[in-house]
Each structure stands twice: as structure tokens, then as C-alpha cells.
Amino acid sequence: MKLEEEIDEKYYIIIDPKQEFFISNKDLPNWIMNSSMLIDSENKIKMVGSPWINEDMANLFHEIISQ
């Protein structure tokens, strides 16, 4: 089974074409804004970086979403 097949379908990819998140968070460094982010329901960044890049990141992703 591939890693991406294990991810629960309740998580989504959100694209912000109007850059509303960026406009609302101008203090964030560009390297964060240009990365994948996991954001909670309160718009707090919980993880920066692709969760599928390696097993450690995937484990971190699963740990964060299970809280």
C-alpha cells in the first residue's frame, strides 16, 4: 500500500487563489508561505513541509492530526 493511500479522505488540499491567508498573515516568512502547511481550525500552523516526503514527516503528520 502506498503512503498516500493511507491518508484519511477528511483532509483536503486548499489553494488560496485570492491569497487571503497570505494577506491576513503578512508577518510570516516567505519560506513558510511557499511551503505545504497543516493549519488547524483556528488557523494556527501546526506543521510546515510536505508530509509525504519521508516516513518521519508522515509520522509527524499522523501524530498531529490524531491530537
Image (tube, grey):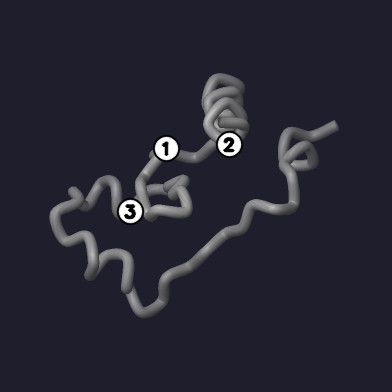
Mark toward the viewer: 3 or 1? 1
Q: CA distance from mark 3 to mark 1?
A: 13 Å
Q: Quadrant of residue 8?
A: top right
Residue 13 x %, y %: 57, 59
Could you tell me the amino acid type at mark 2? Ile
The residue located at (33%, 53%) in the rendering is 34
Could you tell me the amino acid type at mark 1? Met
| Above or below for 21 versus 54 | below
The residue located at (61%, 22%) in the rendering is 55
Determine whether, in the image, residue 17 is placed left or right of residue 2. Answer: left
The residue located at (32%, 73%) in the rendering is 20
Q: CA distance from mark 3 to mark 2?
A: 22 Å
The residue where tag 3 is placed is: 34
The residue where tag 2 is placed is: 65
Q: CA distance from mark 1 to mark 2?
A: 10 Å
Label disc, if present, on residue 47 of the rendered structure: 1
| Above or below for 32 versus 63 | below
Q: Residues within 10 Å of mark 2 (few under 14, many from 20)?
A: few
